[in-house]
C-alpha cells in the first residue's frame, strides 16, 4: 500500500471517528435535554395534583391545559379504557400493566412504538390513578434532524481534512516520488541523477539532503575509483612492459652465453654484467611494487617516536658528502620528534634524495629544511633540476603514478619513487604538495603531524 493511500485512510479514519464521537455526544446530550424538559412538565402536573388531592381530576385538567406541552391525561378507576380528561391526539396504550404503572409512579417512563411517548402515573385513593403522557414525536424528529446534520458535518470534515492533508503532504509526496525515481535510476546503474533541492526542516527534507550528500559521495567515490582503476591499469601496463624489457634482455644474453656464439672472455664478462644490471633493475621494480601494495594508505602498525630532525640531517649530510659538486643548503631545526616508523621515514628520504641524484644535473643545487609550524612538521626538499611536467604541479602525486615513463629506464630506477613517498606520508597521516622551486626545479613540501 502506498504512503499516500495510508495517509488518506488514516486521516479519513481519524476524522470520521472524531466527528462521530463529537456528534454522538452532542445528539445524546440534546435528546436527554429534550426528554428532561418533557419529564419536567409531567412532574409539574403530578406535583400540582398531589398538592390538591381533594379535587385531583379538576386540578389535572387545569394543569394539563396550563402546560406548554400537549399532554394526554387519562383517569383509570377499574375501567380498562379509562376516561380521557385532556386529549392531545396521542395513541396511548390502554390500561397499562401493573408493572408499568408502578415504575412510572416513581419516575417517567418511555413507551416505545410508532408514536412513542413519555408516561408518568399519579396514584389516587381506592386503586384509582391518573396517567399523564406526552408525545416524543418532536424529540424524535429533532433526533433525525440532528443525525442528518451529523452526516453532513462528517462529510464536510472529511472533505476539509482531505484538502488540508493534500495541501500539507503534496510537496513531501512529490519529493518522495522523485527520490524513488532517482533511487530506481541509481539501482539500474544509470548516471547518478540530481535529487530535488531541499531547504525545509521536515523529515523528508532531511532525508533529501542526506540522500543528496550520499549521491554526491557515491558519485565522487565512483569517479575516484574509475580514475584509480585507469591509473592502476596504466601502471600495470607500464610495470609489465618494464619487467618484460629486462626479461627479454636477460633471455637474449642467456641464449648467447649458453651457446658458442660468445667465446671471447671480455665479451662474456660484459654480457654477465648486463644480465646482472637487468636483474638488479627487476628487483628494484618488484620491491617498489610490493612496498606500495603492502603499505598503501593503512596506518602505521608499529608506532615509535622518531627524531625526524636527526634522521633527515643524516640523509641530507650523506647526500652532500656523496655529491660534492652540488651546493646543498641544510636548515633543520633540532630536537623535533614525530610518531611513526623510522624505517619507512628513512625510505621516504632515501627516495627523495635518490630522485634528485638520478633526475637532476650533477651540479644542480639542493635546499633542505625542516621547521615546526603551528603544530605540524614541515619538510621542504627542493632542487635546481629540470622539474616536472606542468600537469604534475596541478594534479599532485597520485597512487601508482609515474610522471615520466622514460625516466626509470634512463636513470635506472623503477619510476615509482614519488608514489612510494606519497604512500609513506599518508601512512603517517600527512600530505605532500609539489610546486616549482625558487632554484628552478622541483619543490616538495611534506607536512606531518607533530606528536
Image (cartoon, helix red, strand yellow):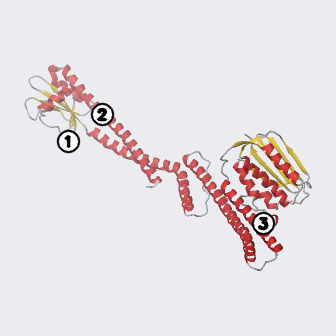
Q: Which mark is residue 277?
A: 3
For the C terminus, the quadrant is: top right
**Observer able to see residue 397:** no
Residue at 77%, 47% in the rendered image: 447
Q: Nearer the viewer, residue 29 or 427?
A: 427
Q: Earlier in the sequence, mark 3 or mark 1?
A: 1
Q: Is residue 216 above or below residue 30?
A: below
The residue wearing badge 1 is 113
Q: Nearer the viewer, residue 305 or 424?
A: 305
Q: Residues within 10 Å of mark 3 (few under 14, many from 20)?
A: some
The residue wearing badge 2 is 32
Residue 109: percent from left, percent from top: 21, 32
Q: Quadrant of residue 15?
A: top left
Tell us which disc is closer to us: 3 or 2. Answer: 3
Q: Earlier in the sequence, mark 3 or mark 2?
A: 2
Q: Which mark is residue 122?
A: none
Q: Is residue 281 above or below residue 126?
A: below
Q: Is residue 404 above or below residue 170?
A: below
Tell us which disc is closer to us: 3 or 1. Answer: 3
Amino acid at each position: 500500500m502506498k504512503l499516500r493511500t495510508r495517509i488518506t485512510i488514516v486521516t479519513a479514519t481519524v476524522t470520521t471517528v472524531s466527528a462521530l464521537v463529537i456528534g454522538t455526544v452532542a445528539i445524546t446530550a440534546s435528546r436527554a435535554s429534550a426528554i428532561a424538559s418533557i419529564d419536567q412538565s409531567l412532574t409539574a402536573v403530578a406535583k400540582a395534583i398531589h398538592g390538591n388531592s381533594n379535587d385531583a381530576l379538576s386540578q389535572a385538567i387545569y394543569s394539563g391545559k396550563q402546560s406548554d406541552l400537549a399532554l394526554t391525561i387519562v383517569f383509570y378507576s377499574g375501567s380498562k379504557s379509562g376516561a380521557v380528561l385532556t386529549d392531545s391526539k396521542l395513541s396511548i396504550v390502554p390500561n397499562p400493566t401493573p408493572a408499568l404503572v408502578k415504575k412510572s409512579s416513581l419516575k417517567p417512563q418511555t413507551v416505545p412504538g410508532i408514536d412513542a411517548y413519555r408516561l408518568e402515573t399519579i396514584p389516587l385513593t381506592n386503586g384509582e390513578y391518573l396517567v399523564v403522557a406526552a408525545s416524543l414525536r418532536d424529540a424524535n424528529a429533532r433526533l433525525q434532524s440532528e443525525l442528518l446534520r451529523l452526516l453532513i458535518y462528517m462529510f464536510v470534515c472529511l472533505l476539509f481534512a482531505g484538502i488540508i492533508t493534500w495541501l500539507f503532504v503534496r510537496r513531501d509526496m512529490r519529493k518522495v516520488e522523485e527520490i524513488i525515481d532517482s533511487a530506481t535510476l541509481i539501482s539500474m546503474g544509470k548516471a547518478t541523477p540530481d535529487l530535488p533541492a531541499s531547504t525545509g526542516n521536515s523529515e523528508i527534507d532531511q532525508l533529501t539532503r542526506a540522500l543528496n550528500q550520499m549521491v554526491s559521495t557515491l558519485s565522487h567515490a565512483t569517479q575516484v575509483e574509475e580514475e584509480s582503476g585507469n591509473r592502476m591499469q596504466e601502471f600495470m601496463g607500464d610495470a609489465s612492459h618494464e619487467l618484460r624489457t629486462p626479461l627479454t634482455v636477460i633471455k637474449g644474453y642467456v641464449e648467447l652465453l649458453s651457446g658458442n656464439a660468445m667465446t671471447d672472455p671480455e665479451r662474456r664478462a660484459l654480457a654477465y654484467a648486463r644480465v646482472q644490471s637487468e636483474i638488479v633493475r627487476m628487483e628494484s621494480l618488484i620491491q617498489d611494487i610490493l612496498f606500495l601494495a603492502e603499505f598503501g594508505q593503512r596506518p602505521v602498525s608499529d608506532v615509535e617516536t622518531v627524531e625526524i630532525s636527526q634522521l633527515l640531517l643524516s640523509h641530507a649530510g650523506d647526500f652532500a658528502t656523496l655529491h660534492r659538486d652540488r651546493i646543498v643548503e641544510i636548515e633543520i631545526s633540532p630536537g623535533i620528534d614525530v610518531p611513526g616508523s623510522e624505517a619507512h621515514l628513512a625510505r621516504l628520504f632515501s627516495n627523495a634524495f635518490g630522485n634528485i641524484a638520478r633526475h637532476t644535473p650533477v651540479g644542480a643545487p639542493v635546499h633542505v629544511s625542516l621547521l615546526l609550524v603551528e603544530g605540524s612538521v614541515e619538510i621542504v626538499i627542493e632542487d635546481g633540476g629540470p622539474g616536472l611536467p606542468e600537469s604534475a604541479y596541478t594534479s599532485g602525486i597520485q597512487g601508482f603514478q609515474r610522471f615520466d615513463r622514460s625516466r626509470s629506464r634512463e636513470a635506472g630506477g623503477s619510476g615509482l619513487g614519488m608514489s612510494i613517498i606519497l604512500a609513506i606520508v599518508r601512512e603517517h597521516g600527512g600530505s605532500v604538495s609539489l610546486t616549482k622551486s625558487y632554484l628552478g626545479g622541483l619543490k616538495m613540501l611534506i607536512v606531518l603531524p607533530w606528536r
